Each structure stands twice: as C-alpha cells, then as structure tokens.
Amino acid sequence: MLYLCGHSLGLQCRSTARYVEDELRDWRRLGVLGHHAAHRPWIGYHQEAAAGLAALAGAGELEVVAMNSLTVNLHLMMVSFFRPDAARNRVLIEKSAFPSDRYAIVSQLEYHGLNPDEHLIEVEPRSGERNLRTEDLVALLEREGPRLALVLLPGVQYLTGQALELAPLIDAARASGACVGLDLAHAIGNLPLRLHDWNVDFAVWCSYKYLNAGPGAIGGCFVHERHARRSDLPRFAGWWGHTAATRFQMGPGFVPMPGAPGWQISNPPILSTAPLLASLELFGRAGLARLRQKSLALTATLHRLIDERLSRSVEVVTPADPAQRGCQLSLRLALPAAQAHACHVRLEAAGVIADWREPDILRLSPVPLYNSYQDVFAAVEALARALAP
Ligand SMILES: Cc1ncc(COP(=O)(O)O)c(C=O)c1O
C-alpha cells in the first residue's frame, strides 16, 4: 500500500502500541491507584502533552491543552469568544469551510437568536479563481470590521490545500476589534505555527491527521496567554478545568485553572491520549523545522512530476507557492465527474491511498514523517495509469 492520505488520517507510530499498552498494564495492575501511581499518572495526563503541543503550536505550555475533539472545542471556544452585541454580531468564515465548522457556527448564531443568512459572512475566491487572496481578505476585514464579532480562519484549507497567510489576516481582524479563531485541523504538525506571536485569540485542532494520534483521537485547543486569567469570560465549566490543587475538595464553586487547561471539562480519555504522546515524542525527536524542509521538497517533487507528466488531464488547485501550502496537493481531474471518480477508484485498487472530495478534488499528501521520494514517483506513475486505463 502506498499511503498519501495523512491529511485525513495519519499512520500509526511504531511506539503507539507501547504507549497504549503501558496504560492498559497500569490500569490492570493498579486500578484506581493509577491516577497517581501509573508510569504517567493519569491525574495530570493532559500535561504530558503540553510541551509537545506547545512546540508545534508556537505557544507557551499554558496556552495549549489536549482535550475533546475539534468541533467540541470550537463550540467551547465560541462560548467564550463569540459574544455578539447590537453592534458586533457577525461571524466571518470562508465559503468552503469544513462543513462541521459551518454547522457549529450556524448553530451558535441561532443559539444567540441571530439569523445566519444575515449574520454569517462567507468569503470566497474571486470569480474564476480557486484560492483566497490575502489582500481581498484584508479589504473585507477592514470593510466589515466594525460589525464582526468573530473571524474563523483555517490554517490550511481542507479542500484546496491553501495555507493562508495568517499573520496579516489575524492582524487585520484584530485591528477591526473582532475575536479571531483558527481551525488548524490541516495545519498542526504540517506547518510551523506561531500562535502566541500571531496573537490569535484561540485555535482548535484534531490530532488524527498530521499528528498521527489515531482515529477519533483527542483534539487540541489554544487560548492566548492574554486570556489566561480573565474572569470576565463566560465558559462552560467542568471539574477538570478547576484548579488542580483544590479539585478534590469537591467544593461547589468553580475556580478555573489559568490558561487553556481551565477550559477542560472532563477528565481526559487516557487510552486516546496515549497515542498522541507517542506521536509528540516522535515530533520532538524529528523536529518540525526539519520535517518542513523535507515536506517542501516532497510536495515540490510531486507537483513537478504532475506538471511534467499529467498537466493535460490534471489541474493542481493548491497554490504553487510553497509558502502557501503544506504537504497536500489537491488535484482537479479534467474528466467528466463519473470518470474522475472512477479514476480515484482505480487508484485505490492499485494500492494508492489518496482521497476524493466532492465534487471534483483528489487530495494527495506526501507526509515527511513516513513518505519517501520513491512513494511520490510511484504515486504519479499509478495516477498516470489510473487516468488512462
Ligand atoms: C478542517 C476540519 N475542521 C473540522 C473537522 C471536524 O473534526 P472533528 O470531527 O474532530 O470535530 C475536520 C475533520 O476532518 C476538518 O478537516
């Protein structure tokens, strides 16, 4: 099997089984005592991920936490950071945002008694273009700014693979007075991030793509340090967000931990967090900067081979500028819809795992942790055969 689908579900690290088995053994051996006596005590398990996540997010350890899943975290962040009033009551997202984000936002607008037709602004590329332009987004943010309560941007657009130029966009959104959140599902572990310096209010991600933490793995969340000790922000609280020192006094009053961990609700799922720890350890050893260097070369090779061999039947939708993309290339096949889809089926039958996104996009991602140049050459060879059976 030739696996180029890390943008959807990353592969299992060799050490994952050991990490999970450690927890199963401690649970078997220790029962409830594992909360304190386990090899990695469960009582502070979320902290085990903090250093690794902080390094990948470009954040302080207090600014990140592994918890829940992406859409749940987005809802929790919106409870705190989407505070519409009479003047500011709109949310700006991209037109082809991942549907779950749109569902979450529409449901939050409705929860606040707002009409999504009026209060949701969806920005799309210029007519005839596939990708968003920074200058257009900045102009829109300036124009709509006074009415915006929240701007939600993707790190990497899931369908096109475009990596947005986040720093100027965040600056423009914040200058307008809006809160800014990021969906980093396709960015974390893929691109270097500087969430703290970018001054974004919050970010959410899943860990099953480039973070290789397994299907349905625990997600993650960033809350900027400047919100770490704010007591005026509403939040949906639970006991795991309560100050650790007094949590087990079981008092009635909620006193949040400072920083992102204070947004936790429940105690963390140990068995779905263990694979994340395995993966973060690997990222720590490999180093994201080195992975990015290899990624740039792998994706450029894929792009060049497609241009050389398949340009008559394939359009690369992802920006050609390496600064505007991560691992992923999104291809539009210049075939009628049914034939394009059949091409993906043939590719998979030939053992090349990529994925198909309606209506017309084939996504391929060489991932530097586990893909090689050989994989890239073989994938293009297989795609050529699948296009002309
Ligand atoms: C860009 C993006 N946002 C949100 C989600 C939803 O993630 P979850 O099911 O973990 O909430 C996904 C899932 O693939 C995604 O790709």
Image (cartoon, rainbow, N blue to C red):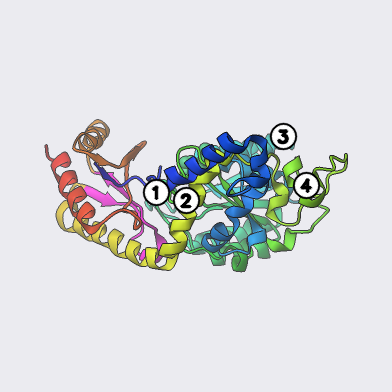
Image quarter hosting the C terminus: top left
Residue at point 60% right, 63% down? Answer: 59
The residue tagged 1 is: 13
The residue tagged 2 is: 278
Q: Quadrant of residue 194?
A: bottom right
What secondary structure is marked by label 3?
Answer: helix
Q: CA distance from mark 2 to mark 1?
A: 7 Å
Looking at the picture, tell me which residue is in the foreground, 158 or 242.
242
Q: Alpha-carbon neighbours of circle 3 within 10 Å: few (<14), some, or many (≥20)?
A: few
Q: Earlier in the sequence, mark 2 or mark 1?
A: 1
What secondary structure is marked by label 4?
Answer: loop
The residue tagged 3 is: 111
| Mark 2 or mark 4, whichever is nearer to me | 2
Q: CA distance from mark 3 to mark 4?
A: 26 Å
Which percent across, then down, holds residue 89? 72, 47
Looking at the picture, tell me which residue is in the foreground, 16 or 259.
16
* Label pair 1/4, CB-CB below 8 angstroms: no
